[in-house]
Image (cartoon, rainbow, N blue to C red):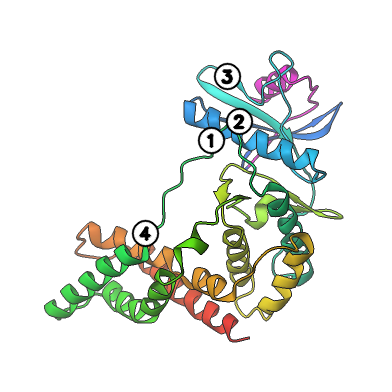
Amino acid sequence: METHTKYIASLFGLTAKNANREKFGFLCETEEQGFVLVQKTIATDENSENILFQHQVKEHLYKKGFTQIDRFFVTEQGGTPCLKSSGDLFTVARGFNKPKADYAQKDQLLAVVAELGKIHKISEGVKFDGEPKKRREATSPEKALGLLSSQKKKLMKAGRFSEFDMIFLKAYEKFEPYIQAWGGIPKDVLGNNNYICHNLLKEENIFMEDKPIFTNFVAASYGHYLTDLVYLVKRYLKAEPQGDLPMADIFEAYKKGHPEALLDQDFFKAKLMYPDKFIKVAKEFYSKNRSFAPKAYLTQMEECLERGIALENYLQL
């Protein structure tokens, strides 16, 4: 595999000296460009379009001066950001052998927030030829309330509750007002999807140097900039459940990169509290009519409840 990886790198004009397996591919040190990451995915039209979309997003950011990204290299023959070989697509991107972000460190989180604002500002209103990866849409508030309230009525009518049912009922009581609040956000606010959102700002995708480096744009899509900001706050509270970094400080950091942003607190709070994971877990479990609850489902439901409590506490800062 190492030999093949080096061969793939050579088709992008790079001489790889080694190839070490990482979570997302092979990290190679090259003579020409330092570290690069060689990745493989199945050759489908959807994946080809997604790679093209990622490439165009990164090139747009790079040309606008935002250079701390895992920019793709292009093939020597054809100048394309991916190479098809034996039913697979290969990409070679700038790689990093640096510390990954730690969102429990407030200064690191705020630095990521400020640079994220720049990405959104630079990408406003820009459209690309490639297509973002199709994402599974979150259940709408109206549909979620219908499904969950119906399930609650079934349980109450039966009068017998499993361990999972008990956690579900407790979580539903907590989350119902937040589902309703998200459903009440004006549609014209929700429709402002003229930005590029990264959508996958896990710590493993952010490397820390003088400025944060953003990588793995595989889930990037058009969207509202607050989507990414909400994602970051949730990751912060996952890393630091007792986090006490006020929303005002996060907004201030974001404004450094995107001064014109309208940071509507009602929108932000409603999106932050919308329990999409709780809805997903409940739908999956009850759709299978199980007579018992696998531990994985119990754990996920408990985590949803704990996360909701942490978010409530955070919003009281």
Per the image, the residue denoted by label 1 is 131
First of labels 4, 3 by sequence position: 3
* Residue depicted at 75% across the width and 39% down the height: 95
Please state which amino acid type lies under the numbered disc 4.
Thr
Element on which disc 1 rests: loop
Q: Position of residue 140 (x, y in %)?
A: 36, 61
Element on which disc 4 rests: loop
Q: Nearer the viewer, mark 2 or mark 3?
A: 2
Q: CA distance from mark 4 to mark 1?
A: 22 Å
| Quarter of the image that includes the N terminus | top right
Element on which disc 2 rests: helix
Per the image, the residue denoted by label 4 is 139
* Residue depicted at 75% across the width and 44% down the height: 69
Q: Position of residue 170 (x, y in %)?
A: 34, 81
| Quarter of the image that includes the C terminus | bottom right
Q: Position of residue 195 (x, y in %)?
A: 62, 51
Viewer-closest of 39 and 266: 266
Q: Residues within 10 Å of mark 1 (few under 14, many from 20)?
A: some
Q: Is residue 285 above or below residue 37?
A: below
Viewer-closest of 198 and 38: 198
- In the rendered image, which quarter is residue 37 located in? top right
Count how many numbered circles sit on residues in the image.
Answer: 4
Q: Residues within 10 Å of mark 2 (few under 14, many from 20)?
A: many
